[in-house]
Image: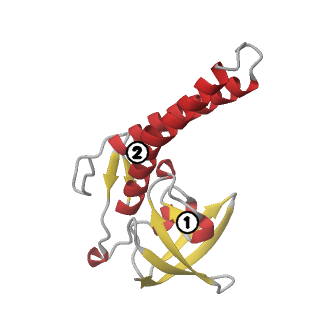
Amino acid sequence: MARSKKSIKNDNSIEMDQDTFDKLTVELQHRKEVLRKEIAQEIAQARDLGDLSENYGYTKAMEKKEMNENRITELDDMLLNAVVVKKNFSDGLIGIGESVEIQNLTTKSKRTITLVGSEESQSADSTAGKISISSPIGKAVYNSKIGDVVKVDIEGKTTEYKITKAVK
């Protein structure tokens, strides 16, 4: 399932680190093996109550089923197109799964970020310092080097950041 950085990428490929791949795999398995059964039981119980046209419990259970099946399809597609990228600080370029400290050159404030796959991988969480390579900061830092100054454009405003160090 998982492929390395050297595998052939296609237009649908989604880069992610191994941790994200593993979490999505666990979620998919849980949805298929646990949630499907629970939802099926809810539907069966609601059916037993009689008239389905005015059965709120049945309607809610069917909505829940549809949402779960849609997420299963989404996860299947993501994992099918996943390209698992390994950390590789030795090449000098900042990649997915790697953490660095960046400093805003205007405010002098520093923060540590970890690059994660594209937004499609749903592993970004800016509050936890996980920045998607699809985001403005992620695009600027991705494939840069320690010591580089990168420009980030957000809503017409440009901010410069210096990549100060790698964080292990």
Q: Is residue 90 above or below residue 153?
A: below
Please count the marks in the image.
Answer: 2
Q: Is residue 64 above or below residue 121?
A: above
Residue pictured at 25% horizontal, 52% vertical: 3
Which of the labelled discs sits on residue 81, or is there none?
none
Q: Label 2 sits on what residue type?
A: Gln
49 relative position to 90: left or right: right
Q: Residue 80 location in percent, x, y? A: 33, 41
Q: Which residue is mark 1?
A: 137
Pick the front one: 90 or 16: 16
Q: Is residue 109 above or below residue 125?
A: below
Residue pictured at 32% horizontal, 70% vertical: 87
Residue 154, quarter of picture: bottom right
Pick the front one: 56 or 96: 56
Are there few (<14), some (14-19), or many (20+) residues within 10 Å of tag 2? some
Q: Are marks 2 and 1 in contact (CB under 8 Å)?
A: no
Q: Residue 20 location in percent, x, y? A: 42, 58
Disc nearer the start of the sequence (2/1): 2
Residue pictured at 58% horizontal, 66% vertical: 152
Q: Residue 151 location in percent, x, y? A: 56, 69
From the image, state whether disc 2 or disc 1 is nearer to you.
Answer: 2
Secondary element under disc 1, as helix, strand or loop, is helix
Secondary element under disc 2, as helix, strand or loop, is helix
Q: Quadrant of the C terminus?
A: bottom left
114 relative position to 109: left or right: left
**Residue furthest toward the front?**
48
Q: Label 1 sits on what residue type?
A: Ile
Q: Which residue is mark 2?
A: 29
Residue pictured at 45% horizontal, 34% vertical: 73
Are there few (<14), some (14-19), or many (20+) residues within 10 Å of tag 1? many
Pick the front one: 24 or 88: 24
